[in-house]
Image: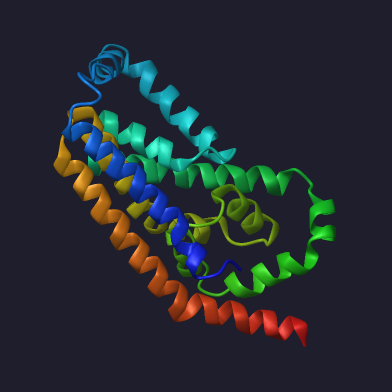
Amino acid sequence: MKSDAKLFVKPLVLTAVLTLAFVALHFGWWGEVTEEDLLRGLFQQHWSVAWPVFALGAIVYTAVGGPRQVLSFSCGYLLGGWWGGLLATLLTGLGALLTMAVVRHAGMDWVRQRHGGRIDLIRQVLAQDTWLWICVIRLMPVGSNLVTNVAAALAGLSPRAVFLGSLPGYLPQSLLFAYAGRGVALQDHSKLWISLALLVGSSVVAWYLYHHGFKQRLARFKGSLDD
């Protein structure tokens, strides 16, 4: 498990990137942003093809490990902060289900044999209240979304519980980047401030949940395995 200090590396990097974007917009370093008109024209004129292709592509993209932050940014750019964040959350959740389905039908017995101890630990830690602990994991700004999905499938966790726990866990960071994408599209400083506030808030919630339940639960099960 990473040290507590390392838990804040990713949030600090994201904060720095968003702050740089804010400064760039404030001083007009990017000039006129014309990509929004191009994208909106494409989706408005060919919506019957563009949106299904976008949705399916996004599900596959996140299923194979594509950064969900990029998807959220794109959805916010097209639909706005709130609706873009909701759409990105749903598509990322469906991507998690796709990953689990593929892993379960791929016959990865060699992985189970090689990492049986770790898989058993994951199963024991997350077997009860699966949706809640998956939500906590998704909220924490560390780790790999793809690795979590693969591990959940190998551990035999309920896809329904993983999906229901992932949605609220994904939502804060999805809204964060969706509002950032909307701020870039409109050159609106307030949207970037909202994304920064969401970043701080989600990091605080993740830190609290990690130190008030998940960390102790993980240590207890690891101790039982060592014994």
Q: In which quadrant is the C terminus drawn?
A: bottom right
Q: Position of residue 204 (x, y in %)?
A: 34, 67
**Res 74 → quadrant:** top left
Q: Position of 58 compared to 97: left or right?
A: left
In-front residue for pair 92/204:
204
Q: How many marks?
A: 0
Q: Position of residue 193 (x, y in %)?
A: 20, 48
In-front residue for pair 125/3:
3
Query: Quick check: can you spot residue 141?
Result: no
Which residue is drawn at the image coordinates 18% and 27% (left, top)? Answer: 28
Image vertical order of residue 16 relative to residue 157, above or below: above
Which residue is drawn at the image coordinates 25% and 21% (left, top)? Answer: 36
Q: In which quadrant is the N terminus drawn?
A: bottom right
**Res 11 → quadrant:** bottom left
Which residue is drawn at the image coordinates 43% and 80% (left, top)? Answer: 212
Q: Position of 141 compared to 144: left or right?
A: left
Q: Position of residue 22 (x, y in %)?
A: 23, 39
